[in-house]
Amino acid sequence: CLRGESEVFVGTVTAGDVYLIQIGDWDDSDVAPTPGALNVTFVPPPPANDDCANPTSIAGLGSFAYDSTGATTSNPTSGGGPCVSASLDEADVFFLWTATSAGCVAFDTCGSSHDTILTLRSGPGCATTCLAQNDDATVLCPGSSSYAEPGINFAIGDQVLVQLAGFNGAFGAGTLNV
């Protein structure tokens, strides 16, 4: 907010209820009164896979759609590994991916509508070890500003917690490609 502006977050509201919004002035005698605007923004509820404790289960190879609109910031315990500071990982959603065959598998968010941070963590649960993280690595998706994660070898049945975050508050529709 700029000088003279205020922001208030109101929790859950109910359709049809009436709310009184009072706008006043703080005694700021050195500023002449000016017209203002009242902006009301609806924040949608978080998606079902908004927390590392409730990932969406997926398996095998394919493209998996997601939408991080309304998602909160979770930042599960990294437990070490190559992950960097998660201070810019915001509006994240989670998948629990299970390998259906052995081999090298690559993950990317090519085709997503926003700047993403892709993090792969070992196994289910929030206290996992970081296997890999990609925020603008060197492998650029064709015709896009998104980046791909180099492949990792997996055995049949291995599970990976996939965290898809928006960089610096970015959110929206996306695709996890495995």
Image (tube, rainbow, N blue to C red):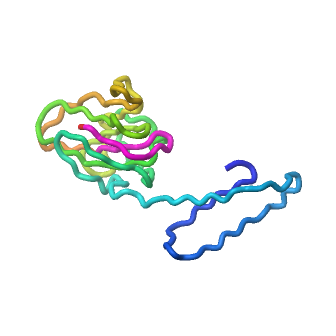
Please identify the quadrant where the C terminus is shown: top left
Residues 106 and 144: in front is: 144
Residue 76 is one of the magenta-drawn residues? no
Horizontal placement of 167 versus 162: left or right? right
Residue drawn at point x = 30 percent, y = 34 percent: 108
Residue 159 position in % (x across, y down): 20, 44
Residue 55 position in % (x across, y down): 29, 53
Residue 66 position in % (x across, y down): 33, 48
Span highlighted in magenta in the image = 162-177
Relative to 9, is 156 above or below?
A: above
Relative to 88, is 55 above or below?
A: below
Quarter where residue 135 is shown: top left
Q: For the stretch drawn in magenta, what is the main secondary structure? A: strand
Residue drawn at point x = 24 percent, y = 43 percent: 160
In the displayed image of the protein, which residue is found farthest to the bottom? 17
Residue drawn at point x = 43 percent, y = 39 percent: 114
Residue drawn at point x = 24 percent, y = 32 percent: 106
Residue 172 is one of the magenta-drawn residues? yes
Residues 44 and 54: in front is: 44
Relative to 15, is 155 above or below?
A: above
Residues 150 and 146: in front is: 146
